[in-house]
Image (cartoon, helix red, strand yellow):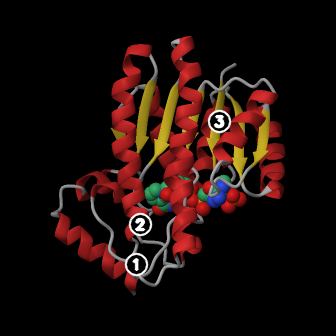
Amino acid sequence: MDNVLITGGTSGIGYALARVFAANKYNLILVSSNYENLKITQQKLQSEFSVTVYIFEQDLSELKAAENLYNSIQAKNIHVDILVNNAGYGLVGATEEIDFCNDEKMMVLNMISLVELCKLFLPHMYKNRHGSILNVSSTGAFQPGPFTSTYFASKAFVLSYSKAIRFEAEKYNVQVCTLCPGATITNFFAREGTDLPKTSMPADEVAEYAYRQLMKNKSVFIPGAINRVMQAFPTNIKMLAVAKMKKD
Ligand SMILES: NC(=O)c1ccc[n+]([C@@H]2O[C@H](COP(=O)([O-])OP(=O)(O)OC[C@H]3O[C@@H](n4cnc5c(N)ncnc54)[C@H](OP(=O)(O)O)[C@@H]3O)[C@@H](O)[C@H]2O)c1
């Protein structure tokens, strides 16, 4: 059985992905910053799917957390076949009003830990000529996001970085794919303090779609026809819509 490592596997899109992978007979390695949630998720998924679920408590918004996680996984001799960099959150507000320490933590989680985990696991995948990475970006990657500026910029970074390393990894038979969800029904909006948009998709639909595209080795994928159509709108219009949504 192959093992899939999912950061942020206890809630929302990460949890929905964990369920899809478990249903397809993958063992799971779940990471989050909350041990209680991890324990509950482990018990639930192990009993429902009869797969092995390893759990690792790690706050990936801290520098060096990715390296600590990697060392803990190595120490247990657990092999990672698929890495899903999913953990992330957004912050809203005018840029001068968001405390830099909060922004910094979010940027470490959304970008630095993601990059570090790619760098740590890719050499093993290259050596084995086998492995996949799924990085979770957002439709926010395709435009600037007024009043959520660093979050949208972090997702643009994830998209650009993932496409670049996909190019590099191809010759080692390793695939790097990017999921760009639009609004999805998860804890994301409650956490950032905004209302759930009416067009939000269920997380399990996002996860099913993402799994299918990953298995086809598609480069970049956006779940939901409406989300795909919306990407054709002019950038200025999309920026106005985001500003209205995040400012009000
Ligand atoms: N929901 C949307 O509309 C939407 C749209 C586009 C992209 N996305 C992206 O999808 C990804 C998943 O978000 P979601 O919507 O599923 O949100 P969610 O329901 O809030 O889930 C986030 C997951 O990440 C974990 N996490 C948060 N902070 C962490 C930290 N410091 N260290 C380790 N794990 C941490 C959470 O667990 P703990 O808090 O217990 O650590 C949880 O398991 C994110 O990258 C987000 O940017 C979401």
Near mark 1 (Cα within 10 A), the count class, few <14, some 14-19 or many ≥20, is some
Q: Quadrant of the N terminus?
A: top right
Q: Position of residue 186 (x, y in %)?
A: 57, 62
Contact between marks 3 and 1 (CB within 8 A): the answer is no
Q: Specify whether 221 is left or right of 188.
A: left
| Secondary structure of residue under mark 2 | helix
Q: Where is residue 56 in the image (x, y as percent from the top left)?
A: 77, 44
Where, by quadrant of the figure, is residue 230 drawn? bottom left
Amino acid beneath label 3: Leu
Name the one closer to the observer, 62 or 81: 62
The residue located at (38%, 84%) in the rendering is 247
Label 3, on which residue?
A: 5
Q: Which amino acid, by three-letter code, is at mark 2?
A: Thr
Disc 3 crowd rating (10 Å Cα; few below 14, some 14-19, many 20+) is many
Residue found at x 44% / y 25%: 175
Residue 95: which disc?
1
Instruction: Tell whether 10 sits left or right of 136.
Output: right
Query: Above or below — where is 227 with respect to 211?
Result: below
Residue 201 in view: no
Q: Where is residue 162 in the image (x, y as percent from the top left)?
A: 40, 38
